[in-house]
Image: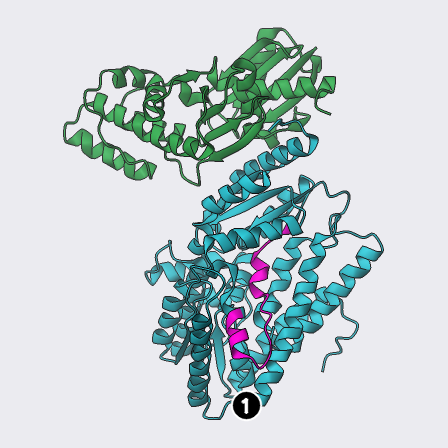
Chain colours: A cyan, B green
Amino acid sequence: MTDTSNMSAKELLGFYQEELYEEARRAKKEGKLVCWSASVAPSEFCVTMDIAMIYPETHAAGIGARKGALDVLEVADEKGYNVDTCSYARVNMGYMELLKQEALTGKTPEKLEKSPAARIPLPDLVITCNNICNTLLKWYENLAVELNIPLIIIDVPFNHTMPIPQYSKDYIAEQFKNAISQLEEICGKKFDYDKFLKVQEQTQRSVAQWNRIASLSSHKPSPLNGFDLFNYMALIVCARSRDYAEITFKKFADELEENLKNGIYAFKGNEQKRVTWEGIAVWPHLGHTFKGLKNLGNIMTGSAYPGLWNLSYTPGDMSSMAEAYTRIYINTCLDNKVKVLSDIISGGKCDGVIYHQNRSCKLMSFLNVETADILQKGNHLPYVSFDGDQTDPRNFSPAQFDTRIQALDEMMKQNKEGVSNE
Amino acid sequence: MFTMGIDIGSSSSKVVILEDGLNIIAAEVIQIGTGSTGPKRVLDEALSKSGLKLQDMAKIIATGYGRSSVEESHKQISEISCQAKGVFFLVPSAKTIIDIGGQDVKAIKLDSKGCVKQFFMNDKCAAGTGRFLDVMSRVLEVSLNEMAEYDSRATEPATVSSTCTVFAESEVISQLANGVAKENIIAGVHQSVASKACGLAYRCGVEEDIVMCGGVAKDLGVVRAISKELKKPVIVAPNPQTTAALGAAIFAFDEVIGANK
């Protein structure tokens, strides 16, 4: 067993990410079940059942960040998936198609061979939840049909009003119970509720450490750059019900607190302006977007996206767990979305906001125009939006991004210096 | 004291030389942009016409799509801020700017001091840009300079899609094939450009005076269509293609005298 005690948070992040993929590959070899899961579907049930988990969204993001998305997007194109479909879905459907070809022919397709992504095994079942979008329903249905495997759907209705009504929580708790009985049938064994409680407790410890990291960006200057959250997010998605996430996040939070104590901040030099980034990262151009802001003296200290995994609830209470999985800000009405983002902007002490008009994520993008308008009326902060995509590199133009963030920078500077009179 | 603003766009290169932040000594345009010989040629032309040397410039600021590749510049500023600065210098009553260049359409809202309050730009799409007009001009075999004149003779503007240059081009081709008069097609093309630009302007909140700049502002057919769409008069900035370069030259002057601390 590898000694992780002396590893830095960054090393732990890399180690546990690889470990999770290795565990899934090993499980497959040993004839154990492998499940592909939506990123904010409850992980607690499968972990209780000792099922190895793979998260296609995280895997797709990794392919995007390693510049390997185009190859698999082409496979999805050939299968008829429209370019307007979410690129996580298209990357995953393309990748699945390559894995399937390999399984059917015994030959590894060239695109799979040279893919920079971690190798993942094909699933034995898939689990999805529509609390972050409805594309996930068709996407997972297609996976299940293509591979002829069971599909578990946890239906989480959209919250058109807040607070979340009790009947909605009751309905979701029933969905959870239904998922458990499906899993019992698939696994051929009873669900262990004592173990489930322990898994829930573990999940809460991971979430607590995740929130501890996120809260550090409220310091000015900040010891944390929001882009770090984009990187560490892999473990809150893939390992929140395991101790891997807790260990790594605790280490990272400890490191950041130590840095703060010693006056070491995330922005080397002097952070000049702080921005909120609304939306998913542009994974294929992560470096460009990060450096573009950095070169202008800007640090990202606000992002609501990592907060999707602020899944705090009371272990042992299904209704409380149901609430955690439904109150995600993109599963709530505009008023609540605005409130969440407003808290993010003020918590991060931000001077401006960048909205990612993400071609892939309609849910996160279509409300941006109205959200930005409402927020600006309240906080008078400048904002810009840019066209991009989470994993399809063709939908992002570096020069257009640069112009917009430079203009935002100039507007923030103007505000700070009091040049503008309104 | 002389300062220089260089605006390298996607399809043209512009240079303005300013004396003491007030007098325009040179304002030159070459109709090819970044990555071409345009930037060097326009620089040479501005210097030769003014009889000045690069060393005479107290400060040089670059703007535009190709701003980061201008070796002669001391600093880069976005074209949004530069347009605002240049237009406000020429038209101090300006509150809304509509700037249509080679590949960008922008609407900029100014406060009473000429500072950028808000701006919106086209997304990753060429519809409604100068490039869109270029494509239409080629298909229609009518030069860009003649398009306004054709438009003025239109009797019933045709409908041309504003969502995609390629689709709009095929629409125009089929309208030509169906015998629709070029005058009416061109008026439709201008309306299409106007609808795209006005959509952005509406998002900013349209406030008078409305000033148009950028190369497309030279096409009075587009100006008329925008004015009609907004139901408000539109002022065309003097020498509208050079306003961003002018703004850059003013920023350079301000920085030299320390007005912008």
Q: Nearer the viewer, residue A191 or A101?
A: A191
**Is A25 covered by the magenta stretch?**
no
Please name the residue shown 51% across and 64% down the image.
A327
* Residue B91: % across, % down: 51, 15
The stretch of residues the image draws in magenta is: A301-323
Whether residue B103 is situated above or below residue A332 in the rendered picture: above
The quadrant of the rendering that contains the N terminus of chain A is bottom right
Residue lying at 53% horizontally and 66% vertically, measured from the top left: A59
The residue at the far bottom in this view is: A189
Secondary element at image label 1: loop
The C terminus of chain A - image quarter: top right
Report the amino acid beneath label 1.
Asp
B73 on left or right of A269: left
Q: Residue at x 44, y 41 (%)?
A: B124
Which of the chains bears the disc numbered 1?
A: A
Q: Residues within 10 Å of mark 1 (few under 14, many from 20)?
A: few
The residue pinned by badge 1 equals: A192
Q: Give x and y (percent) for residue B170.
A: 25, 37
